[in-house]
Amino acid sequence: MLASTPTFLARWCAWRERPFTPRVTPRSVLVVLFGVALLCCGLALGRSACADERAPTRTYSLGECLALTERNHPALFAARARLDAMRAQLEEARVAPASFVGLSSRFGVVPNAPAGSQPSPDFVTQGVAVGLGPLFQVGVSATVPLYTFGKISSARRAAEAHVRLGEWDVEKERQQIRVDVKRAYFSLALARDMAHLAEDALSKLDDAIASIQKKLDEGDGSVDRADRLRLEVSRDELLARIADAKRGATAASGALRFYTGIQTGFDTPDEPLTRPATPLGDVVPHLAAARLHRADVNRARAGVAARSAQVDGARANMLPNVGLGMRFDWTFAPGVQVPVSGFDPATAGPQLTAAFGIEWPLDFLTKNARVHQAEANLDEARSLERLALGGVAAEVEAAHAAAVEAATREENWDRAVRRAKSWIVAVQDAIDLGTKDERALVEPLRIYVLARASQLQALMDTHMTRAELARVTGWEGGGAT
């Protein structure tokens, strides 16, 4: 091994000194093209990813958020699926008479029975003697109901009532989802307003702290370290409010993205909360609207209609069905010429029969129990209807009173905010004139932040109580946001 080392080094040095002559082969060309294609794909993917990152964020208004939620919310998809199932049941009830049509058929082999032969009762002996032939029979039977004493019509009415119930179930789910979307939307606006309020007050406190610190550094005896600490404590309180506002904004934004189905590039207008543009009005129109548009009331009415139709159907089942029965048969067995066991050649070929008939199952005890059960279900549905009509008035009055209280509270806090602003301006003027120092700014600033935060919360409550009033009445035009 040691002896061969110089030889190896000499060969390696000779290889390094010879000129490089590239060899172009089909394989090398394919490798180069494949590498270029991979490079181009990587650049395209990187460019698209950067484009996605630079995609502008779109702001969605409250109306757009509500429209997107009504198209994309899973709960509404589930309610619409239940409604489709009820509509399928209605379609089944409408085509119920067509279900009395049936088709039967059989095919096989039978021993041949030529004319003049004596058929044997033994299938094997007869088949060995004269052979086997094909047999094919087909029959179509139909029963046309002429009078069922209301069985078909009651089933159809019950299915139609169930469809109406499903439609109001979708409407109830939609109204509840609209309340959830408005809560998230206004919560996001409230959180942003709270953050802006805290940042505005924080800038004033920072200026006051800097001024007191400057006086302390200059040795001014009119202020001391406790004054600076008092301002710093107020500043820490505002920082905590800012953190809480950011948490609320993140939670509300996540809820809106889930409701609307828009996961990227989603935002809402950064606008301050304002009062609803539509006046609230009196409670009487809301009470009347609830009796007409409230989803729970209409669901109860549809339930009464469905239970009433089921009672009529249960009573109709006690009576017979009158109808026309028809049957068409066709038999093919060319090898059978004389009657054999189970088949008569005289019945071969097409045959049509029709006759009137009555069908009347006589299980009266079972049917009577079903009538009692249907009547009990109807009594329950009527009681629930009375409960819905009676309870809706209390809910509407409570929701209307809450909306009035929130609006009144917001007006009072608005006056407090204006007075606190005037107080801050007066103190700031006194500080500029030198008659007061920065310590006098703490109290009016604290009052202003408290009053403005309370006003913002009252605005939020005003919008949400209006939304709840719209839900309990089913009336969006009654002062809803």
Image: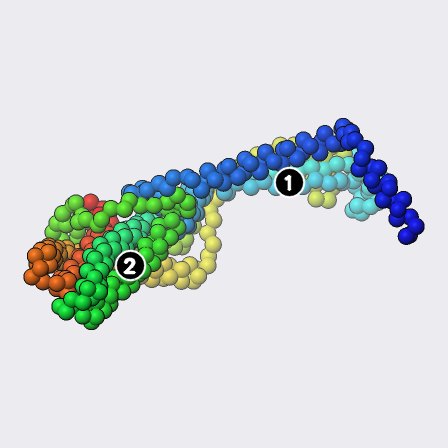
The residue that label 2 is drawn on is: 242
Residue 306 numbered tag: none
Residue 269 visible in this rendered orientation of the protein: yes
Type of amino acid under label 1? Ser
Q: Relative to 162, say whether 350 is above or below.
A: above
State which quadrant residue 221 falls in: bottom left
Q: Is residue 342 left or right of residue 54?
A: right
Q: Considering only vertical position in the picture, is 29 above or below 434? A: above
In this view, the residue farthest toward the right is 3
Q: Position of residue 446 (x, y in %)?
A: 17, 63
User: How many marks are shown on the rendered structure?
Assistant: 2
Q: Residue at x 22, y 48 (%)?
A: 272
248 or 88, nearer to the observer: 248
**SS category of the residue bearing label 1:** strand
Query: Does 21 sit above or below residue 255?
Result: above
Q: In screen coordinates, is 200 left or right of 371?
A: left
Q: Amino acid at mark 2?
A: Ile
Task: In this rendered view, identify the residue nearer to me: 14 or 152.
Answer: 14
> Dot 1, crowdedness within 10 Å: few (<14), some or many (≥20)?
few
Disc 2 secondary structure class: helix
Please tell me how crowded label 2 is: few (under 14), some (14-19), or many (20+) other residues with Cα within 10 Å.
many
**Residue where numbered disc 1 is placed:** 105
Q: Position of residue 188 (x, y in %)?
A: 29, 52
Q: Residue drawn 66% across and 35% down?
A: 35
Q: Nearer the viewer, mark 2 or mark 1?
A: 2
323 relative position to 30: left or right: left
